[in-house]
Image: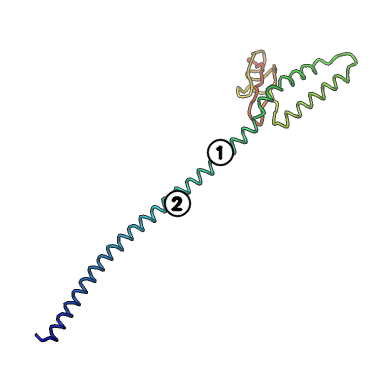
Amino acid sequence: MTKKDKKQAEKKTSLFSKVKTAKKNHSKKNKAVLELEKKVTAAEAQVEELKDTCKRAVADLQNFKRRTEEEQKKLISFANTNLVLEILPIVDNFERAMQHKPKDESKEWFDGISQIYKQFKGILEKQGVEEIKSVGEKCDPNLHEAMLHCEGESGIIVQELEKGYTMKGKVIRPAKVSVGNGS
């Protein structure tokens, strides 16, 4: 073999060697690229999972805020319930006093008592307090407390012994009533 042939053979061998090395490197790069693609896919899945978790956390927080606001509104609306329950016996006593109007000439005194009573009733109405209708109504255990049974249509309230009240739709004191027994 001549020098020229040797050089060409060496060049060919060198080229083959470079091609083999390039193929190995390319194969390694492909493996690395595949590994990186797997990592990217896993990272994307993790990002989606974290986004979903974040969305749920935000929704939970919004629900919590809404429930808390509703509870606060309920607390505020019924905060005065105890005070109203303390005032109701006074209103009852005013009503009893007004049923026994004096026969003498104390009309001004009676008118004053009537005005105070109306003022009390107005304050209670502003707070959402309403009387429970009783006489002539069907007895409802959610609204009425049957104290006596007497002659009258069965299940119908014949007499109101003590007025009942609701406050913003919630019973704060049931009406004490006498209910007909059907005789």
Amino acid on which disc 2 is placed: Lys
Give the residue drawn at x 82%, y 21%: 113
Sequence-first tag of 2 and 1: 2
- Tell me the mark number nearer the camera, choosing from 2 and 1: 2
Q: Eyeballing the image, is 98 above or below 66?
A: above
Horizontal and vertical percent position of residue 45 = 38, 54
Q: Residues within 10 Å of mark 2 (few under 14, many from 20)?
A: few
Give the residue drawn at x 68%, y 25%: 83
Mark 2, residue position = 51
Give the residue drawn at x 43%, y 50%: 50
Q: Eyeballing the image, is 102 above or below 6?
A: above
Q: Which quarter of the figure is the N terminus placed in?
A: bottom left
Q: Report the residue that reaches farthest toward the right.
A: 105
- Residue 46 relative to residue 167: left or right: left
Q: What is the quadrant of residue 85 in the picture?
A: top right
Horizontal and vertical percent position of residue 21 = 22, 71
Q: What is the quadrant of residue 167 in the picture?
A: top right
- Residue 54 relative to residue 116: left or right: left
Q: CA distance from mark 2 to mark 1?
A: 24 Å
50 or 159, which is in the foreground? 50
15 or 42, which is in the foreground? 15
- Residue 1 relative to residue 123: left or right: left
Amino acid on which disc 1 is placed: Arg
